[in-house]
Image (cartoon, rainbow, N blue to C red):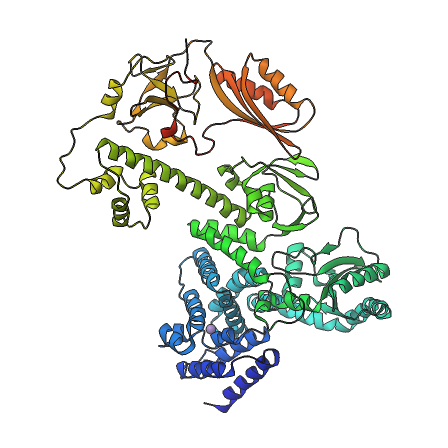
Amino acid sequence: MEERYQKQFREILNKIVDYNPNADLNFLQKAFDFAYEAHKGQIRLSGEPYVVHCLEVANILADLKLDYITISGGLLHDVVEDTKVRLDEIEENFGAELANLVNGLTKIAELRLESREDRQAGNFRKMLLSMSQDLRVILIKFADRLHNMRTIEHLPRKSQVRIARETLEVYAPLAHRFGINTLKSQLEDLSLKALDNNAYREIENKVVLKREEREARLQTVIEPIQKELARLGIKTWVIGRVKHFYSIYHKMKTRNLSFEEILDLTAVRIITLRVEDCYHALGVVHSIFTPLPEKFTDYIASPKQNMYQTLHTKVVGPDGVILEIQIRTRDMDQRAEVGIAAHWHYKEGEAGPDEVGAHANWLRDMVAWQLETTSSTEFMENLKIDLFQDEIYIFTPKGKLITLPRDSTPIDFAFAVHSEIGLHIIGAKVNGKIVALNSALHSGVTVEIITSPNQKPSIDWLKFVITSRARSRIKKYFKDAQFDQSVKLGLEIIDRHLERLHIKKVKDDLEDVALSFGFSTMKSLYAAVGAGDIPAQNVVRKLMPPEADAPPHDNVFVRVMRTLHKGSKGVRVQGFDNLMFDFAKCCNPLPGDKITGFITTGKGITIHRTDCRNIERFLGDPERNIEVEWDVDRDSNFNARIRIIAEDRKRLLLDITEAIYSFDINIAALDMKQSDAMAVGDFILEVHNLTHLVKVIRAVRGLKGVVNVERLDNIGDEDLLVEVSSTSSAKNSVKI
Ligand code: MN
């Protein structure tokens, strides 16, 4: 091996030992030797041997003070992708942990897609998936990209543009999301240099030209602060520095300003030893310079989504120019630079917030939801909202700050506070006033969420929620609910078939059948039958004793006819009179609703609304479904359930009941609950027909303070059709 590479590697080892005396140096040496051998003879476009790239990547990771496994991963990151080495050899030599890292990196690299949008979405998806195994994968990928960007001038122009764009659109925002500011600004500056070299040079020159003047001006800010802090005995470091070039460029572009018009080129940063000193220092700054009202943000008490912690304030500087001042502890400063990488640091000092926990949560939400999203465009749109959009800051009633993407709704806020709150939200107040659940929130407001244990998410919420967290939780809720319902239905269908064929149900047999269809549990088999994916006959056929004669065809309808007896009137069934029937509790049909009959063995016919969720699967099934029509007297009554949500106030119930009685409607039952300042009332009303009900709903909606009135049907899963009550003098049936 050439001595200069060995020497370069020793320098990296020294760096590592400095921050982590316990690092396994033999392991690192072995990884380096392995990478050197594997890449032997390979030359980069820069003309350098390939192993230089491996060393540089490891060096960047050592600058982030990462653990020796990650740095070894940096040394070996390209061997499986670019050499003959196989993954199992890595595992054999270095163990599963390192092999996993290399595998994650190889998966990212394998990606080749056609359109730019697809490629970008694909890259993100792959990255999210491999990261979700081990977040260190992305750290190595960042280091890899950073070195590639540093040497990008050796590539053909077309590749330069493609890679620089991808860096700006994918890698830099991700680095920001993980709080790794030092990588983010380097990646952005290098991308700018590749994409718009003239602009980059211009900014660079101007920053250098005005340096002395700028530094002199900064001193007039820094000195008085330093003096006063020293007098109070608070140990701090006060630094003024120029923002990175890309952020200057971005500001010039988006606000259409010239370089000279950008006044806040510099930011002053005060670094303290202890958290309480931050607040002392803030007091000192505000006593020397006039603060801009409402321009103070406490990210220490309420960290940003990417775990960034700092006090931000804006003051009027000595020359009347607005100046941004940031105050944080040394540990916070370190975390603001390296973000999630801090988790793998050799631990010292105060414990920070749970970086990995918070990032892993975000990642889990993203992965869960990206698995459900099939369109690249939709995926990228939503990801961009999550990564690129401006943040807004919302307070809980207790004063906690929650950070959300712009245009978030009360529902996003509720899910950000807690999933349970999101799943049961019925209303929201912004600064004390009730707002619609789909309204966009603005920074600085206090949001109070009103929940009810009976409330469930609405599928409509998906049309306006912004955050991936809310979206994935709502989708999961509906998926789970649907699954449970399918299981119930599937179980019922199979039982019914078995009963009809007089086959005894044996658990072991059913388990075998489930296996034969490729399901690991009976529940999944029931769900598939319930969802209509597998016909019940196919399941039952497998349960039939081989020699048994098929029972004579016995149409359910024929048997229902046999059990007929005089029932109540109210509907007509295919021209028959005197059929036994009952109204389904799940959808409580009213004259005016479209209805259909559903044959229940031994129990007659149950009348459902045609839009009832419980019978969707059976509509058109000649064995169970039967046409029916209304046949009612004008003044017969039917029960209908409604739910009223209103701001609680004096006389509320009185006004509601008066409105109802004015339509000559009897209230059969009512259940009114208070939840914070909201009242939720469930009413059972005796109405003549649908029009009658619609009229009263409209009237109640017009009452003061009423937020919503809706007809309740298919609420909950408890009213599956099989459980519909017996028909003898059913209370829902119509007497004439
Ligand atoms: Mn590489």
On screen, residue 381 versus residue 534, left or right, reads: right
Taking the spot 51% from the left edge, 66% from the top edge, the residue there is 138
Residue 242 is at least partly visible in this image: yes
Q: Position of residue 515 (x, y in %)?
A: 27, 50
On screen, residue 597 versus residue 260, left or right, reads: left
Residue 689 is at least partly visible in this image: no
> Which of the 4 quarters of the picture holds residue 506?
top left
Taking the spot 77% from the left edge, 57% from the top edge, the residue there is 314
* Residue 20 drawn above or below residue 576: below
Q: Residue furthest bottom?
A: 3
> Which of the 4 quarters of the picture holds residue 500?
top left
* Residue 507 drawn above or below residue 705: below
On screen, residue 229 versus residue 88, left or right, reads: right
* Residue 172 drawn above or below residue 603: below
Looking at the figure, which quarter contains the N terminus? bottom left
* Residue 228 drawn above or below residue 650: below
Q: Position of residue 168 (x, y in %)?
A: 55, 62
Taking the spot 38% from the left edge, 13% from the top edge, the residue there is 570
- The foreground one among 417 and 605 is 605
Looking at the figure, which quarter contains the C terminus? top left
> Which of the 4 quarters of the picture holds residue 568?
top left
- The foreground one among 301 and 312 is 301
Tell how many labels: 0
Q: Position of residue 106 (x, y in %)?
A: 41, 68
Q: Position of residue 40 (x, y in %)?
A: 41, 84
Taking the spot 41% from the left edge, 16% from the top edge, the residue there is 733
